Amino acid sequence: MSERPPIAIRCRGLVKTFGRRRALAGIDLDVTGPQVLGVIGPDGAGKTTLLRALVGLLEVEAAEATVLGYDLTGDVVGLKAHVGYVPQAFSLHRDLSVMENLRFTARLHRLAEDELRARAQPLLERTGLAPFVERPASALSGGMKQKLAIVNALMPRPSLIVLDEPTAGVDVVARAEILAILDSRRHDTLVVVSTSYLDEMTACDRIAYLHDGRVVAAGTPDELRAGAGVELYRAWGDDPHVIARAARELAWVAETQASSEMARIEVPVATMPEAAVVRRALGALPGVRLVERAAADMEATLRALARAAVPGAAA
């Protein structure tokens, strides 16, 4: 592999169309240095298309689009030597064993057999795949297939690894192992991962929120929470479901949810009255014993971002 390139992504007006459908409608994105970047957003927002574009799998148009110093609108052959990609669907050779798949990738990257084993063995042991190196990929469980795909992507020691929903549908143990592997790479690799899990979003260094093919918000989880413009209240009482229904009738309440213990109430800052008025109004709801204000969490933040991204949506 050639000299390690600068770790950076810079996109200005990145566009991708499929026929008449514009999947990416002008992506603006700047990422510099090793970190975990979470790409999030509703279904159809363009997440998978963006990830495929970043690894050079799609022809795109842009005012500027560089990844690791390579122009995405030009020749991206050199880029692929520095990138590991894990798509949603398992894409390795199902008829080859675990080790044969890794050996195939090693040959593509011109790794000698001893280097292959030196790099692969720690990853195989960490993922629990070491006892199954002779097992065909087709015979692996869903979680094991996903771990193999990640080991395969990491083995060439890429500067950038891109993963599309890597923990979707895997068991709890496999999910924890996958997250631990990605966390261990955040200090020397740019990890770009799409996810729909709130805890995974919160664990990212930075987040890019997509809607209709555009990045409508980007920053650290704390920055997104602070800028979401939503206040979160919790109302404790005898029947949280009754409280949640009653709170929903208040004109300045955007969202309510009820658990077995309390009602969760989200209030957009733009339309809310003074905090004292909010507390009094919530405290007067049927059966409420206690009202407390809580820091906006990622769940409230995502809903606020979704509302803000839709023209004409209620604040």
Image: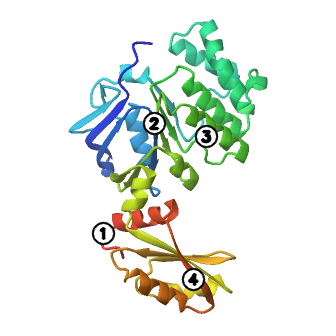
The N terminus - image quarter: top left
Q: Report x, y in % for residue 103.
A: 62, 15
State the residue position of label 4.
244
Name the N-terminal-most of marks 3 and 1.
3
SS at mark 3 in the image: helix
At a point 60% along the width and 83% down the height, the residue shown is 290
At a point 71% along the width and 47% down the height, the residue shown is 172
Name the N-terminal-most of marks 1 and 2.
2
The answer to whether any part of residue 136 appears in the image is no
Q: CA distance from mark 1 to mark 2?
A: 32 Å
Res. 183 image quadrant: top right
| Mark 3 or 1: the one toward you | 3
- The disc placed on residue 15 is none
State the residue position of label 3.
179
At a point 30% along the width and 51% down the height, the residue shown is 20
- The amino acid beneath tag 1 is Pro
State the residue position of label 1.
311
SS at mark 2 in the image: strand
Few, some or many residues within 10 Å of mark 4 (<14, 14–19, 20+): many
The answer to whether any part of residue 125 appears in the image is yes
Q: Report x, y in % for residue 267.
A: 43, 76
- The amino acid beneath tag 3 is Leu
